[in-house]
Image (cartoon, grey):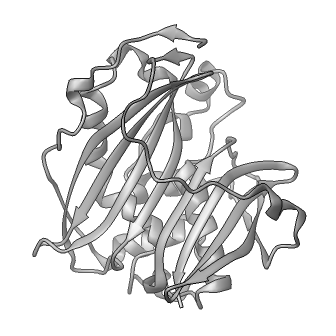
Amino acid sequence: MAGTTVEFDPSGLNVWSDEEPFEVTGERIAEYAAATNDPIEAHLKGVVAPPIFGIVPVFEAIMMPVLEVVPMDIFGRVVHGEQDFHFHRPIRPGDKLSSRAKAIGYEGKDNGSTITILIECRAQDGELVNEQYLTAFFRGVNAGPKVGDGAPSHRFDPALAGQSPLAVVPAHVDLDQTFRYAPASGDPVPLHLDEQVAKDAGLPGIIAHGLCTMAMSSWAVLGEVADSDVARLRRFAVRFSKMVFPGDDLQTRIWRTSSEGGETTYAFETARGTDLVLTDGLAVIAD
């Protein structure tokens, strides 16, 4: 296996972080919706949160489990690999939430290594609001054979690419998108905000937040197959395949794949021209 050999610490797996509290306001929901160009009225008015807003209450809980396993000196190589939301109910204004996270496994691959984080978000009464699997990828690092568990699969069937999609939804990444998304999401990473920092990292300029692109794909899917009703969304997962830049024009292509037990499953991908920026998209919608 290629890459610099780095030892991850298996003793840090399955250790829950401290719980992080978060109180939801309609203003914060509306700010997030506006920052992702969400056209759904209930989101823009702060009546109910868009699905990817689910990352906001858990953001502070994510980092500590990674630090329990991965050496600090390789953090400059990390990128967001995949994100998989499992929804039990929508987030609404007035919710007092508590989130915790733990690393559940890691694995060396041909071009780097992954670590998977499981996140729980609960209401004040203990009700489970959502679960999330975040997979981070460390470029050029060899952590060795698989240890622990990975995230559930959400692979795209290649045969779908030869079929006409059910819908194609456009989106545009505004030139100021990252400067609006950063405060709305609570993600201040300078690669999204500082041209020089981005160029020093070998990028042509600032890049869009992956979760902002994911949020754009989510309102595309909700609008086309769920009557814009976030309460019907049960699962939403993607793989971040290529970087997105301010000014990009995107298209989310959606295919219906199956229906069972009162739920319909859709596959999707988001493209910039011929480049796929989100792949392995999966959405499960209650009928």
Residue at coordinates 75% horizontally, 52% vertically from top-left?
247
User: Vertically, is 99 above or below 150?
Assistant: below
Q: Position of residue 169 (x, y in %)?
A: 76, 73
Q: Please name whichever residue, 50 or 147, is drawn nearer the observer in this view of the structure.
A: 147
Residue at coordinates 57% horizontally, 11% vertically from top-left?
3
Side of 162 relative to 86 (left or right) = right
Q: Position of residue 119 (x, y in %)?
A: 30, 53
Quadrant showing the N terminus:
top right
Q: Is residue 39 visible?
A: no
User: Vertically, is 256 above or below 190?
Assistant: below
Q: Is residue 33 visible?
A: yes
Side of 48 relative to 222 (left or right) = left
Residue at coordinates 50% horizontally, 72% vertically from top-left?
33
Side of 109 relative to 184 (left or right) = right
Q: Position of residue 143 (x, y in %)?
A: 44, 18
User: Vertically, is 148 above or below 54?
Assistant: above
